[in-house]
Every structure is written in structure tokens, then in C-alpha cells.
């Protein structure tokens, strides 16, 4: 008997959702519902000051307006610190964590950027500090907590883009799972939440692809199953710039004044390759016709697709 698909959408509401966010939500939703699966919503508001309640509420309202539904009450990461701490303690007991006292300036001066993002690969400066030096440094600076990576290549199979690999010491480096201000990092939180929620299909933008080997590593260390990953193309504006939450003309508040729900669903489905022509479409129709084989791999420029 095949396993029921459980998908999710996990926005960070530091601003209003834009069309790129909505495309990701739509594809994740269609994939799960086409397979008669379950769908969950997680609000990634770990950094609560950047993600005020009004923006969390707005994200939920936008998704509801679009016709996306979920099978359990939304999960809020800001309420789950004790859970993340429990799993961080398991990693600590395995000898995988250590305190890092490096400043951001020191990090950027010491190493080249990771190939998948703007963060530098950590040089291991604090990886072997003796206990007495750690105790002395803690008196003047609260450390971040890093996870030691293995001396190996971790590969994943992405269902849309194929194989992706990283040699962890060179391409990733020891990475932060708890910031110096006490907030848990994305990598640990997303792994724990997906596992405890039973998520087995993760659909997200390909800008996060480089995070996946890190998450697979944490899954292994905590004894979690690895979900199926599907990374998707990003939406760009007419000039080829990736959409951001600061692009207010691309958020749903602005768009809903000019277009109906069916118009926007049709725009998104056509831009992604699900529909062969741009026209209004109902959610039930898109669920019926959805097929990953039709979804584009190259990034989508809105000037062409939506005009």
C-alpha cells in the first residue's frame, strides 16, 4: 500500500506574500491534492520581531482567499522553542555541537561564500577551543551554536532538477543551528517540524536547494526519515529580478483589486506550465490536470508569462 502524501507550505511572513510565494504554495498544494494527500501550513515566524502577528494573519488570509486549505491548524514556529531545544540536546549528546564566538565581520573575512548562498563556509575557527577558553569567552560574548559536518559528500535526488551533491567540509562547513541571540536556526527547525508533522513531500524554491544536504544530515543524526524534495523555478519581474516581499505591486492585496481568484490561479498555472494558455481557472480543475512533467525548470519572467 502506497504512503499518503503529506505536503506543506511554510512561509516566513516578514512581508506580504508575493506572486512567487503564491506560486510555491499553489504547486505544493496541487501536488498533494492531486495525489489525494494531506496538506499542512506552517508559519515560519522564528524571528518574531520580523514576523509580527498582522503579517502572519495576512499570509493565512491570502492563502485562504486563493482557495488553499489545510488539514490541521497552522503550526507557528515561534511557539516551539522547547521542542527545538530537545532535539538540539540530542545533537549535543552526540558531540556534534560547539559554541562559536566569531563575529559576522570575522566570518566574511575568513572564508569564501557557500556556492548556494551569500553565507561564508565556516573555517572552523572555534571548532576546537579548550573548555577554559570557552568559559572565559562566554563572560563577554554569547556564542552561536554550530553543528559539525561530516567529511563526506551528501547527495539528494530532487524530483524536478535531479541529483544535487555537496562535499560538506568544502561546500557547506559547520553551520549554525542556534544564533547568538538564542533563536534556533532554520535548518534545525525545518527538519524537526517536517518530521514531527509527518511531512514526506517538500515543495519549495530552488534557491533553497543548497540547504537540503544540511537538512538530510540533521535528519540522519536525529533518526528522521528524509522526505521527497521538489524544488521549483523562481518568479522574476520584467527586468529579470527575483521577486521579493518589498515588491508591493506583486502582493495579493494589490493584485486582488485587478484580478479575480480564477484570474490569478490561471496566471500562476500558465506561468508554471500547468496550463497551455493563460485563462481563468478554478482550483478543482488545476488539481485534476496537475502533472510535474509540465512544470517548467527555468526561472519564469513575469513580463512574458503574465504581461
Image: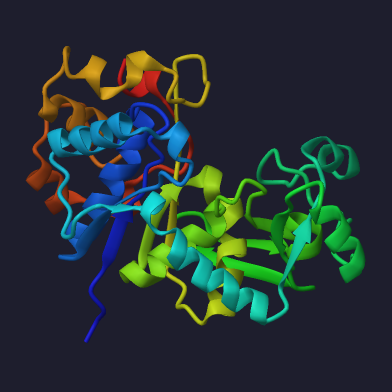
Q: Quadrant of the C terminus?
A: top left
Q: Is residue 258 toward the left or the right of residue 106 in the image? A: left
| Vertical order, 278 against 109 (above or below) | above
Nearest the eye: 235 or 88: 88
Image quadrant where residue 266 sits: top left
Q: Is residue 165 toward the left or the right of residue 84 in the image? A: right
Question: Where residue 7 appears, x then y in whole percent?
Answer: 29, 60
Q: Is residue 130 toward the left or the right of residue 22 in the image? A: right
| Vertical order, 102 against 239 (above or below) | below
Q: Residue furthest bottom?
A: 1
Which residue is located at x 55 percent, y 54 percent?
184
Image quadrant where residue 40 sits: bottom left
Which residue is located at x 52 percent, y 20 percent?
240
Question: Where residue 241 appears, x then y in whole percent?
Answer: 53, 21
Residue 293 in view here: yes
Question: Where residue 34 appears, x then y in whole percent?
Answer: 18, 58
Nearest the eye: 142 or 163: 142
Image quadrant where residue 134 sits: bottom right
Way the structure is coloured? rainbow
Residue 228 in view here: no
Which residue is located at x 27 percent, y 66 percent?
6
Question: Where residue 265 appears, x then y in whole percent?
Answer: 19, 33
Nearest the eye: 241 or 193: 193
Nearest the eye: 244 or 175: 175
Q: Is residue 141 toward the left or the right of residue 258 in the image? A: right
Q: Quadrant of the N terminus?
A: bottom left
| Vertical order, 183 against 177 (above or below) | above
Amino acid at each position: 500500500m502506497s504512503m499518503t502524501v503529506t505536503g506543506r507550505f511554510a512561509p516566513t511572513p516578514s512581508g506580504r506574500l508575493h506572486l512567487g510565494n503564491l506560486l510555491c504554495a499553489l504547486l505544493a498544494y496541487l501536488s498533494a491534492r492531486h495525489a489525494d494527500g494531506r496538506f499542512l501550513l506552517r508559519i515560519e515566524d522564528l524571528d518574531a520581531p520580523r514576523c509580527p502577528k498582522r503579517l502572519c494573519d495576512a499570509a493565512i488570509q491570502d492563502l485562504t482567499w486563493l482557495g488553499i486549505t489545510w488539514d490541521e491548524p497552522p503550526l507557528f514556529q515561534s511557539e516551539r522553542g522547547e521542542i527545538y531545544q530537545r532535539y538540539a540536546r540530542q545533537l549535543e549528546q552526540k558531540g556534534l555541537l560547539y559554541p562559536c564566538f566569531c563575529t559576522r565581520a570575522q566570518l566574511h573575512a575568513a572564508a569564501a561564500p557557500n556556492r548556494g548562498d551569500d553565507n561564508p563556509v565556516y573555517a572552523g575557527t572555534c571548532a576546537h577551543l579548550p573548555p577554559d577558553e570557552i568559559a572565559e569567552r562566554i563572560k563577554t560574548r554569547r556564542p552561536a551554536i554550530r553543528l559539525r559536518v561530516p567529511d563526506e559528500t551528501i547527495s539528494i535526488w530532487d524530483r524536478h532538477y535531479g541529483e544535487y551533491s555537496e562535499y560538506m567540509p568544502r561546500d557547506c562547513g559547520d553551520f549554525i543551528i542556534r544564533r547568538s541571540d538564542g533563536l534556533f536556526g532554520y535548518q534545525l527547525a525545518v527538519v524537526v517540524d517536517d518530521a514531527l508533522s509527518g511531512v514526506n513531500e517538500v515543495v519549495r524554491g530552488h534557491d533553497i536547494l543548497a540547504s537540503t544536504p544540511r537538512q538530510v544530515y540533521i535528519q540522519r543524526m536525529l533518526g528522521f526519515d528524509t522526505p521527497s524534495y521538489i524544488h521549483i523555478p523562481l518568479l522574476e519581474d520584467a527586468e529579470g529580478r527575483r521577486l521579493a516581499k518589498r515588491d508591493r505591486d506583486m502582493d495579493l492585496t494589490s493584485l486582488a483589486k485587478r484580478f479575480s481568484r480564477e484570474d490569478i490561479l490561471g496566471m500562476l498555472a500558465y506561468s508554471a506550465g500547468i496550463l497551455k494558455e493563460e485563462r481563468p481557472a478554478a482550483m478543482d480543475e488545476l488539481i485534476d490536470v496537475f502533472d510535474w512533467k509540465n512544470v517548467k525548470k527555468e526561472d519564469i519572467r513575469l513580463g512574458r508569462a503574465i504581461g
